[in-house]
């Protein structure tokens, strides 16, 4: 398939990241988001393996230990989210300042922030409940976190789809220009722009996959129980564990350091011209 119509841009997206080594690993885990999502991989990985061992033998000691690890990492991750609502308020302000955004898309972006902001607030209440300091009942807080996370994911499906389509349209336009451009320098600028939008398209695709995983997990939470209403039963910890690991791994990848771009004045001018 011609790269100009490739809907995923896997090669371009992977090539934009530094290779796996200790330096890159340190750069990823030194970020709060990177370390938190690595912990998420441990959380949902232990949930999956606990389900696996306990499904073979409901008295499995290994299964019980892994289930305890799942519960422990789930609780420890809540520390990273304390007053994270402030981060979301700042992101919301930045979103409201965006220019040339269709009103319908801006609405879904705002609702996405409102949803995840609700999740952060009530997740903090669940954390405080562990030491009996929460003013909100655990059942209420759990239901509000599920609803907030689900709303955010639902809006995310729309916003990330729009971003992916925008990047795809930009690449198609650049491909048309590249097909008729004869000047070597201009071709180089167009190819650089193609690479940039290919990476954007790949990142949007990854976020779309992550959101599909998260909306499934959030819909399975108590109070929503969407799979149970549709299929007659909740998703198993095995399915939820796999989805959580995929979601966490994608954000770890996003926080992996990028290959350094070569700063050239002509390229910068080209980016401004063709953006």
Image (cartoon, grey):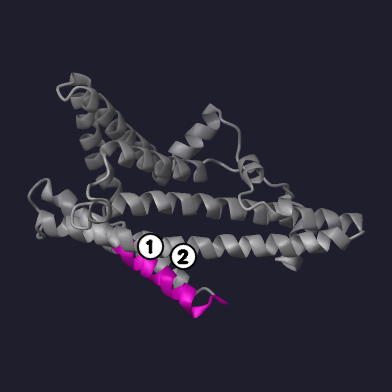
User: Callout 2: few (<14), some (14-19), or many (20+) C-alpha neighbours within 10 Å?
Assistant: some
| Residues in magenta, as a range | 99-117
Residue 216 vs residue 186, the one in the foreground: 216
Q: Please determine whether, in this image, residue 100 is positioned above or below residue 197.
A: below
Q: Please determine whether, in this image, residue 58 is positioned above or below residue 149.
A: above
Tell whether label 2 touches label 1 (CB within 8 Å). yes
Name which quarter of the figure residue 67 lies in. Answer: top left
Q: Please determine whether, in this image, residue 18 is positioned above or below residue 210.
A: above
Question: Which label was assigned to residue 154?
Answer: 1
**Residue drawn at 44 percent across, 60 percent down:** 157
Q: Is residue 113 left or right of residue 19?
A: left
Q: Which residue is mark 2?
A: 158
Q: Is residue 55 left or right of residue 22?
A: left
Q: Secondary structure at mark 2?
A: helix
Residue 35 vs residue 249, the one in the foreground: 249
Horizontal and vertical percent position of residue 196 = 67, 54
Main SS, magenta residues: helix
Q: Please determine whether, in this image, residue 160 is positioned above or below residue 245.
A: below
Residue 116 on the magenta span = yes
């Amino acid at each position: 398939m011609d790269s100009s119509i490739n809907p995923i841009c896997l090669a371009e997206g992977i090539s934009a990241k530094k290779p796996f080594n200790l330096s890159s690993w340190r750069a990823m885990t030194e970020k709060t988001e990177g370390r938190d999502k690595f912990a998420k991989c441990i959380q949902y990985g232990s949930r999956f393996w606990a389900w696996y061992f306990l499904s073979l033998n409901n008295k499995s000691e290994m299964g019980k230990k892994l289930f305890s690890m799942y519960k422990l990492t789930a609780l420890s991750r809540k520390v990273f989210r304390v007053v994270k609502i402030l981060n979301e308020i700042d992101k919301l302000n930045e979103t409201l300042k965006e220019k040339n955004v269709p009103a319908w898309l801006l609405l879904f972006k705002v609702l996405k922030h409102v949803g995840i902001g609700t999740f952060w607030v009530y997740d903090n209440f669940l954390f405080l409940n562990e030491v009996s300091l929460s003013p909100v009942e655990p059942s209420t807080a759990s239901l509000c976190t599920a609803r907030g996370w689900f709303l955010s994911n639902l809006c995310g499906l729309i916003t990330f789809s729009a971003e992916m389509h925008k990047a795809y349209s930009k690449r198609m336009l650049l491909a048309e220009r590249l097909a008729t451009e004869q000047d070597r320098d201009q071709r180089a600028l167009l190819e650089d722009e193609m690479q940039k939008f290919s990476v954007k398209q790949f990142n949007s695709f990854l976020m779309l996959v992550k959101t599909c995983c998260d909306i499934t997990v959030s819909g399975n939470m108590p109070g929503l129980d969407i799979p149970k209403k549709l299929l007659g039963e909740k998703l198993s910890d095995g399915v939820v564990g796999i989805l959580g690991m995929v979601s966490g791994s994608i954000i770890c990848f996003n926080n992996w350091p990028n290959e350094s771009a070569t700063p050239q004045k002509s390229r910068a001018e080209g980016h401004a011209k063709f953006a």
